[in-house]
Image (spheres, grey):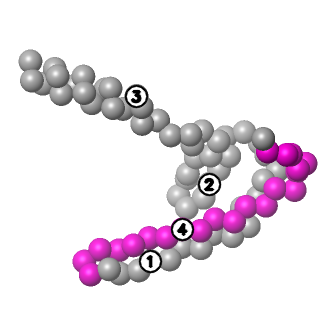
Amino acid sequence: MRKFNLLCLLLATYSGALANDGSFYAAGNTLIPLKETIIQMKKEILSLDRKGDWMQVDIYFEFFNPGLKRNSP
């Protein structure tokens, strides 16, 4: 019974943890769009900092979108 309750809890928390990352996927160190776009990745800066026994990884992406400008609501 305890395993069943744990399974139900895990399934309930998983359903709310879906991210909105459906427009790109990663392959190696490159972001690849799932549908064809004219957006280009211009710059990727990867910085690694050692913090004692841990490593802090910061990644900066810069994209270029030459498409039409749209007003956001």
| Quarter of the view holding residue 61 | bottom right
* Whether residue 70 is situated above or below residue 49 in the rendered picture: above
Dot 2: element? strand
Residue plotted at (25% across, 27% down):
9
Which label is found at residue 59? Answer: 4
Locate residue 68 relative to residue 19 in the image: left or right. Answer: right
Residue under label 1, please give it: 48
Q: Earlier in the sequence, mark 1 or mark 3?
A: 3
Question: Alpha carbon of mark 4 to alpha carbon of mark 2: how far?
Answer: 12 Å
**Residue contact between numbered discs 2 and 1, judged by CB atoms under 8 Å:** no
Residue under label 3, please give it: 15
Q: Earlier in the sequence, mark 2 or mark 1?
A: 2
Q: Earlier in the sequence, mark 4 or mark 3?
A: 3
Residue 21, position in %: x, y?
57, 43
Residue 68, position in %: x, y?
90, 48
Judge by depth and name the residue closer to the eye, 23 or 51.
Answer: 51
Give the foreground label among 3 and 2. Answer: 3
Q: Earlier in the sequence, mark 3 or mark 2?
A: 3
Q: Which residues are magenta?
A: 52-72
Question: Alpha carbon of mark 1 to alpha carbon of mark 3: how far?
Answer: 33 Å
Q: Earlier in the sequence, mark 4 or mark 1?
A: 1
Which label is found at residue 31? Answer: 2
Give, as a three-letter code, the residue at label 4. Ile
Locate residue 6 relative to residue 47 in the image: left or right. Answer: left
Give the foreground label among 4 and 3. Answer: 3
Residue plotted at (59% across, 73% down):
45
Give, as a three-letter code, the residue at label 1. Leu
Q: Earlier in the sequence, mark 4 or mark 2?
A: 2
Give the foreground label among 1 and 3. Answer: 3
